[in-house]
Amino acid sequence: MNDSETNNNVIGIDIGATTTRVGLVAFDAQVLARRTVATPDSEASMRQWLTTAIDELLASHEVHPVVAVGLAVPGLVESGGDTITRCVALPYLEGTWLSRVIASHTQLPVTLTTDVDAATWAEWRAMATAPDRFVHLRLGTGVGLGFIMEGYPRPVEAGRVTHASVLVVDDRASAAPCPCGLTGCVELVAGSRAITSASRLLGFDGLEALQQACDQSEPAAIDLVDTVGHAVAHAVGNITQVYRPEVLVVGGGVMAALPVLFERTVAVLRDALPLTINPAQLGDDAGIIGAAALALAIP
């Protein structure tokens, strides 16, 4: 690596079902500048916002060159290609148009990946000692799972167009259907929409209010979080049996807004599983940092 390479910047784009972020990321994974918006609801509005945000970031740091773009999306992507093959949350993203619009606008190479794979890569690289087997369970509007083994991202149940089977936590015939196509997925209990809906039925207006109620030891709030925590613990147990991680990190918007959920989940698992379970370190920046790093193929 020469000095000029260490001065290169990368654009990292993390499109989520609820929030979209674009960041200018330095070679050392420092986010130099960022733009954030509620995820646009159409192809036209996504095009307009992304190209404007990218132009603003490029203009804000002109000293060092931007050499690539990393694009992370909440769906399934073609391995090594530019095609979003399925995106339940944002179906208008499907196809090749997004990668091609960004490549044409920036005249830079674009690397496409999933949002959970990008965040998993970033969280793994952020560890002081990177484990050989690492899993990232990410709880947001949807739920995602990323796996790294021996320093490389690995597919989670390659070929599936649904959630991984380890994310099913209710196998009863009466289990509710998930948007992914399965039934009984942990997203139906631990996704942000599910928790928000359940909390409002109890009189708590969303995740932050639920956290505050738990801080005040309100029994109804704690019971709800314990119900969610048991579902997450069930998923972690399934994941551990299949992937045998040395370290499992739980992150995403749900954990950021509701940190008591991590505490209650770990309490369920404390004596049951022989692995280290940590909260995510990078917060909202994980997706843009990971997308940028994958664009440079940083080991």
Image (cartoon, rainbow, N blue to C red):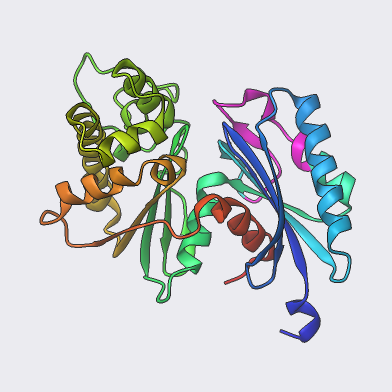
Instruction: Find out whether residue 87 is within the magenta segment.
Output: yes
Q: Quadrant of residue 206?
A: top left
Q: Is residue 209 above or below residue 166?
A: above
Q: Is residue 254 above or below residue 296?
A: above
Q: Residue furthest left?
A: 271
Left/right placement of residue 78 relative to residue 272 reads right
Q: Is residue 59 above or below residue 191?
A: below
Image quarter (top left, top right, bottom left or bottom right) of the N terminus: bottom right
The residue lying at 10 percent from left, 56 percent from top is 271
**Location of residue 247 in the rendering, given as x and y in whole percent from the top left corner:** 31, 63
Left/right placement of residue 183 relative to residue 88 reads left
Q: Quadrant of residue 25?
A: bottom right
Q: Residue furthest bottom?
A: 2
**Location of residue 228 in the rendering, given as x and y in whole percent from the top left corner:** 26, 33
**Location of residue 80 in the rendering, given as x and y in whole percent from the top left corner:** 65, 51
Viewer-side residue, 77 vs 93: 93
Viewer-side residue, 30 vs 240: 30
The residue lying at 65 percent from left, 31 percent from top is 39
Magenta stretch: give its range: 80-99
**Location of residue 221 in the rendering, given as x and y in whole percent from the top left corner:** 25, 30
Instruction: Find out whether residue 229 is within the magenta segment.
Output: no
Total number of numbered labels?
0
The residue lying at 74 percent from left, 61 percent from top is 10
The residue lying at 58 percent from left, 30 percent from top is 86
Image quarter (top left, top right, bottom left or bottom right) of the C terminus: bottom right
